[in-house]
Image (cartoon, helix red, strand yellow):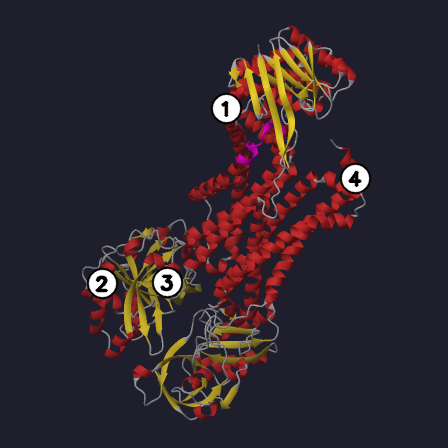
């Protein structure tokens, strides 16, 4: 019996090749997308779950209360860990890290050749760190590796990079010496596996925190500032958290100055929430995927799967009419309804399983594409046996929905009608089942398409809206040696392709999250009244270089060891209710000292477009000129190579690295870019699935209505009339779906846009554009077959039966 | 007595009016009968046959089949009854296109849950008896109409029914093929199988022992 079902199922699938293929393509697109999204979501919500202590590990975060706002920081003062460790013996473990930050390393080989490397993920960690976070050791002793001040623990990747010959014999590199910043010898005491990609603990090597402490006495003992130090605690259990938090509230005044005690409070953030919580921002070198994005992704996955299933159900039930005869015969020959249900379950189940297998292959191929497309967030998704649960879940869900309904519909046929081919799709006005399914599909299609259009406009806004400064063809590089700035500039300007050079602490807009922070107040105000501002050190050429407009006062004339002049932006001037002209000559006090305002610059975007323009102070300080900005005419490889040569000749003992400013700015919109890519991809998927569905349904309807087309032609209808006769219904469906989708998309996209300070206004054209696009694609899909039908010879159609 | 119909009526409602498909039918069949039902198009021949075959229900009257009151039976019982005792032969053969001749023959046995060795034996018998052994692996579309109907009859017979209901079995065949099929029915009847056929042709009706004429749903 079972064999018989399989046999007939297989032959049927082969017989209806076209519809089988359409059906499985549609469904496997849906299933593949769904599997990929689920893998992505599981991955993004699994960050740092693998540590043995994960559930009772917390990051200490800092709330910094200012007069007009509270800032939430994921970094804390360096001495915090030690103080906690000493004063709270009931905490299981407290660990302090500094970084990850950039450092330069050099290695001398036997031939006395020196190779230099710059590493951007250098983490200073104390010995407790290795007990808090699980680490896989390939060589060395975890208990002692970080005990000695001058030790270093490398990751596997770095061993491959530094000692390619010794990869297989790790013991041989133990005890070798690496030079840090060209002066401090560090002895290799261990090799560990790279931290897995789904961890916010990013490092390529570990150096004892003690080393950092000894060499950075000011930072390491300062309770007021906040310089990339992170503190983690491992509690005895989860209940201890609230208690400890409240104890810390009264305890901190022991160390903090009174004005800091008023301003700073601490909280404990569970380790496993770090990756999905936006409040504290991303940890250094890490990134964040907020929970709501994960939920949206799940919703999208569900939608895609559902439209694919709807499609499948739709096509299967449409074909069912051609199977009605078989059902009739089987029933007349003694089959029970259940037998028929089982038969169709097996048949459709078989197809779903084949589709599922092909989806697994698709996912296998696509997952690497996805990783490389999202390389910007260092995504390393893998597809393997661990995802079997996801596949079984999706498979069961699909079979339940996609196979059972058609089986029940088909098995309900009455034998006499079925044999006479009298089964008809019920037509009850506008609301028959199949039509509502297609309308539903197209609602989802419209949502995706319109959302993609709106996101595209916002992305375009990010890219092309004037930022208030010029950024095109600007290269930024670091300059390690302040004494050579003038020489470097003069040599560069001899090159005809380089048009301008300026120095400063950073470009006008904060990139890579890097900004110098300070606070400002009038000299007569006390420190509690100070407000937050961005501090930017700018060379005399800075304003001209970036095309920043002075609206009052003048530019700096020189840079000095001790700064004495400020140029401020309009926003700062407005915070005192001054006019730009009034501001000139006023003195203000910042954390670093006092100076006179000599110029007011027109507001430019000192933060990316998601955020507001904040008060900004430019200083004529010769300190902190650690970036060079180079404007290059035609950034061809030759010009870039010559720039690199000049740089290396000027700064021989350093590692060269450069960025295009525009690229760096674009990275500020990574999440938005991902959302854009996502919506574009999913609207293409949804349209493809939807159109496959339309295509299948159209071929079905046309085969059913062959006779009617023939009759109409015999009675004088022309080709155009017949095509419009078929198109009308589909236009209705798409228009109805559009009308239903618009309010939802409008609401959702408004919500999304509200997250940005600077944003586009939604216009009706974005909706109409999406609607027309979808309609057009749907019409093209349908017309293939209606045109074919319209041109067919009516006699052939009428002769049948 | 194999079966008996007493005052059977069947109608459909159309605009508040009853349109009778069958009206007051009284009809009985003995074991071994060969009955031909005749009448013009729309006179209710096929409907009557479907009622007898329990594929269709009726609105009024009593139907007794082998001493069971069909009108009182539940759907499931009724299905068991016709599964066991009735074989159908259709005008357009109604073979399943995706199955080979052998598999088509086997199908009714599958629904009777017979063992595979039994099935194989019965199918082999039937192939032999109708001389279609050579065609056993062909699909219906590879056969002529006459051959397809042969398979249709073989399939109806394979479960060893007491009664064969044939709805214009020769309607789609040419006269020579039609004659062959009717000869086979004759033979089957001689072997003791009860047959009820619907036909348009006087010639075919002559093969039967009794003719029933229908007009507008009533027996004349």
Give the x, y percent position of residue A330: 58, 25
Q: Is residue B13 magenta?
A: no
Q: Which residue is mark 1?
A: B76
Work out how far the residue at label 1 is from the one at label 4, CA to CA, in angstroms.
45 Å
Q: Are marks 1 and 2 in contact (CB under 8 Å)?
A: no
Of residues A227 and A761, the one nearer the viewer is A761
Are marks 2 and 4 in one subunit?
A: yes
Q: Quadrant of the C terminus of chain B?
A: top right
Q: Is residue A203 visible?
A: no
Tell me if label 1 and label 3 are in contact, CB under 8 Å: no
Image coords of residue A677 (percent x, y): 54, 59
Mark 2 vs mark 4: which is more N-terminal? Answer: 2
Residue pointed to by mark 4: A794
Where does residue B95 sit, x and y in percent of width and height?
65, 23
Of callouts 4 and 3, the N-terminal one: 3
The span picked out in magenta is A408-417
Q: Tell me the CA gap for discs 1 and 3.
A: 87 Å
**Few, some or many residues within 10 Å of mark 1 (<14, 14–19, 20+):** few
Magenta stretch secondary structure, dominant = helix
Checking the image for residue A244, the label placed there is 2
Query: Can you give x and y, in whole percent of width and height, for residue A767 in the image?
Result: 59, 62
From mark 2 to mark 4, how far is it between C-alphas? 85 Å
Q: Specify whether residue A708 is in view.
A: yes
């Amino acid at each position: 019996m079972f064999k018989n079902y399989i046999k007939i199922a297989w032959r049927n699938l082969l017989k209806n090749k076209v519809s089988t293929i359409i059906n499985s393509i549609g469904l496997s697109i849906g299933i593949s997308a769904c599997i990929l999204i689920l893998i992505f979501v599981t991955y993004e919500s699994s960050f740092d779950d693998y540590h043995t202590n994960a559930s009772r590990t917390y990051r200490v975060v800092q709330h910094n209360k200012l007069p007009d706002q509270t800032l939430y920081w994921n970094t804390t003062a360096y001495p915090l860990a030690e103080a906690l460790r000493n004063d709270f013996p009931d905490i299981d473990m407290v660990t302090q890290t500094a970084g990850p930050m950039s450092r330069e390393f050099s290695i001398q080989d036997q031939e006395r050749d020196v190779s230099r490397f710059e590493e951007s993920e250098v983490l200073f960690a104390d010995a407790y760190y290795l007990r808090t976070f699980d680490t896989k050791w390939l060589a060395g002793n975890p208990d002692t590796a970080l005990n000695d001040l001058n030790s270093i623990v490398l990751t596997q990747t770095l061993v491959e990079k530094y000692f390619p010959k010794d990869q297989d014999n790790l013991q041989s590199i133990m005890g070798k010496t690496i030079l840090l910043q060209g002066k401090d010898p560090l002895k290799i005491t261990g090799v560990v596996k790279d931290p897995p990609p789904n961890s916010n603990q990013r490092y390529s090597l570990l150096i004892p925190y003690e080393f950092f402490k000894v060499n950075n006495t000011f930072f390491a003992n300062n309770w007021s500032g906040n310089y990339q130090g992170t503190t983690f605690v491992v509690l005895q259990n989860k209940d201890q958290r609230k208690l400890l938090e409240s104890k810390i509230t009264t305890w901190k005044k022991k160390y903090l100055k009174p004005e800091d005690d008023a301003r700073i409070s601490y909280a404990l953030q569970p380790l496993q929430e770090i990756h999905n919580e936006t409040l504290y921002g991303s940890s250094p070198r890490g990134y964040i995927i907020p929970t709501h994005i994960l939920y949206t992704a799940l919703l999208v996955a569900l939608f895609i799967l559902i439209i694919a299933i709807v499609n499948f159900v739709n096509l299967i039930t449409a074909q069912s009419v051609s199977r009605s005869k078989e059902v009739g015969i089987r029933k007349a020959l003694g089959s029970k309804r259940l037998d028929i249900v089982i038969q169709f379950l097996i048949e459709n189940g078989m197809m779903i399983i084949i589709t599922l297998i092909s989806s697994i292959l698709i996912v296998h191929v696509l997952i690497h594409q996805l990783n490389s497309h999202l390389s910007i967030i260092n995504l390393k998704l893998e597809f393997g046996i661990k995802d079997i649960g996801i596949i079984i879940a999706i498979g069961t869900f699909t079979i339940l929905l996609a196979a059972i309904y058609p089986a029940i519909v088909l098995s309900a046929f009455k034998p006499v009608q079925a044999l006479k081919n009298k089964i008809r799709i019920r037509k009850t006005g506008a609301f028959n089942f199949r039509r509502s399914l297609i309308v539903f599909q197209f609602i989802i299609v419209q949502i995706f398409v319109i959302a993609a259009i709106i996101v595209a406009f916002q992305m375009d806004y990010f890219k092309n809206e004037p930022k208030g400064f010029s950024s095109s063809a600007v290269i930024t590089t670091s300059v390690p040696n302040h004494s050579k700035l003038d020489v470097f500039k003069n040599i560069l300007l001899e090159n005809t392709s380089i048009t301008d050079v300026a120095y400063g602490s950073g470009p006008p807009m904060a990139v890579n999250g890097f900004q110098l922070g300070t606070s400002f107040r009038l000299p007569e105000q006390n420190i509690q009244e100070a407000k937050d501002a961005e501090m930017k050190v700018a060379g005399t050429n800075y304003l001209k270089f970036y095309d920043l407009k002075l609206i009052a006062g003048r530019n700096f004339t020189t840079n000095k060891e001790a700064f004495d002049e400020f140029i401020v932006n309009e926003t700062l001037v407005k915070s005192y209710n001054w006019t730009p002209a009034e501001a000139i000559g006023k003195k203000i006090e910042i954390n670093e000292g006092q100076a006179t305002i000599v110029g007011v610059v027109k507001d430019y975007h000192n933060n990316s477009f998601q955020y507001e323009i904040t008060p900004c102070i430019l200083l004529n300080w010769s300190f902190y000129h650690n970036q060079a900005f180079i404007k290059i005419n035609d950034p061809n490889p030759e010009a870039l190579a010559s720039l690199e040569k000049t740089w290396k000749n000027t700064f021989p003992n350093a590692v060269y690295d450069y960025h295009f400013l525009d690229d760096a700015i674009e990275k500020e919109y990574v999440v938005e870019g991902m959302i854009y890519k996502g919506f574009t991809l999913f609207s293409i998927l949804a349209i493809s699935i939807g159109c496959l569905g339309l295509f299948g349904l159209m071929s079905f309807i046309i085969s059913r209505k062959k006779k009617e087309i023939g009759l109409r032609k015999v009675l004088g209808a022309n080709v155009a009339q017949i095509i419009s006769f078929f198109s009308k219904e589909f236009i209705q469906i798409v228009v109805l779906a559009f009308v239903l989708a618009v309010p939802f998309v409008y609401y959702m996209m408004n919500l999304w846009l509200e997250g940005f300070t600077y944003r586009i206004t939604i216009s009706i054209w974005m909706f109409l554009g999406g609607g027309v696009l979808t309609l057009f694609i749907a019409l093209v899909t349908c017309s293939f077959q209606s045109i074919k039908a319209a041109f067919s010879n009516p006699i052939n159609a009428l002769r049948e039966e | 007595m194999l079966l008996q119909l007493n005052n059977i009526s069947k109608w459909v409602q159309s605009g508040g009016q009853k349109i009778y498909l069958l009206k007051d039918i009284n009809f009985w069949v003995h074991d071994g009968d060969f009955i031909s039902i005749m009448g013009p198009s729309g006179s209710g021949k096929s409907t009557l046959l479907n009622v007898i075959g329990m594929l269709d229900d009726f609105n009024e009257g009593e139907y007794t089949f082998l001493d069971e009151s069909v009108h009182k039976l539940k759907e499931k019982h009724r299905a068991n009854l016709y599964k066991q005792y009735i074989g159908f032969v259709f005008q357009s053969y109604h073979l399943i296109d995706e199955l080979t001749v052998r598999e088509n023959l086997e199908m009714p046995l599958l629904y009777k849950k017979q063992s595979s060795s039994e099935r194989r034996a019965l199918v082999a018998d039937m192939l032999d008896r109708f001389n279609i052994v050579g065609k056993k692996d062909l699909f219906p579309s590879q056969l002529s109409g006459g051959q397809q109907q042969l398979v249709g009859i073989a399939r109806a017979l394979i479960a060893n029914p007491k009664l064969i209901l044939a709805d214009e079995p020769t309607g789609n065949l040419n006269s020579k093929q039609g004659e062959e099929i009717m000869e086979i029915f004759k033979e089957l009847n001689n072997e003791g199988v009860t047959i009820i056929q619907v036909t348009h042709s006087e010639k075919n009706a002559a093969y039967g022992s009794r003719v029933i004429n229908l007009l507008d749903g009533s027996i004349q």
